[in-house]
Image (cartoon, rainbow, N blue to C red):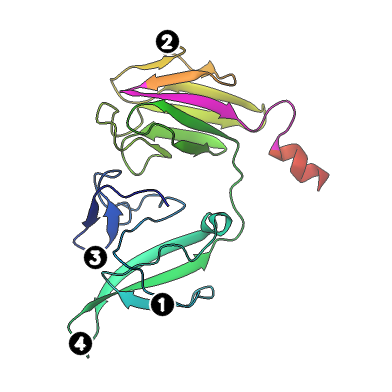
Amino acid sequence: MKEITRLIRCDRGHFYDGGRYEECPHCNNTTIPPVTEYIAQDAEEVKRPTVQEPVRVKSEKVFTDIYSNTERDAVTICCRTSALSNDNENHTMHYFQKTIGAEPVVGWVVCTKGMHFGEDFKIKSGRNFIGRSGSMNISLSADRAVSRDKHAILTYDPKKNVFMIQPGDSPELCYLNDETLLIPTQLKAYDKIALGESELMFIPFCSESFNWEDHKTND
């Protein structure tokens, strides 16, 4: 589990990493990261819950590692805090619901320079917005030089099986392989995308050798 730099509790009782998000990703109705991260001194021992089974734990104690890495990608974690009538302590109630299926990954970008150094970000089919906000598909929340919304847009077209990068709505510039990006441009493996103080390397999964459309047809 990634280290949390600054644990914050919002007004509605959600806990989130203030080092990664400017505002609560739960309240902001954004895509919650594959692993919702919390920090605690000691995690309370809890029985592994079945799907949709609520588990009550004290607010200062949290789940740390009850799912494997593979299962985490298929679990949506929602949290809310409520006061029990028979005591004065707040309790966090966790609901786990398995998602039906998973959106296939088509590629990744890996941060090779900047505050997110070493982190990888999944690319999904269609348009992937890059920005600082937690609502972005690729959220560079720690890089204050990145525009909050739509600094750049990375697109995968499943019909043509190609990746494109283009400027977003931000007035700030984006660079592809050290050249100013002004129009939609096709990406190649290991291309470098620079925005703000971050540099991302593009790693495709779908290519001439493989794409999900052919895989579904073969099945």
Q: CA distance from mark 1 to mark 3?
A: 16 Å
Dot 4 and dot 1 residues touching (CB under 8 Å): no
User: Callout 2, which amino acid?
Assistant: Asp
- Residue 178 is marked as 2
Q: Earlier in the sequence, mark 1 or mark 3?
A: 3
Q: Residues within 10 Å of mark 3 (few under 14, many from 20)?
A: some
Q: Earlier in the sequence, mark 4 or mark 2?
A: 4
| Residue beneath the point at 35% across and 22% down | 195
Residue 55's disc is 1
Whichever of callouts 3 and 4 sits on the residue coming sooner in the sequence is: 3
Answer with mark 1 or mark 2, whichever residue precedes in sequence: 1
Name the foreground residue: 172 vs 84.
84
Write the start and end of the magenta stretch as one range. Answer: 195-211
Q: Which mark is residue 87?
A: 4
Magenta stretch: residue 197 in it? Answer: yes
Residue 13 tag number: 3
Residue 106 coordinates in the image, percent (x, y) = 60, 36
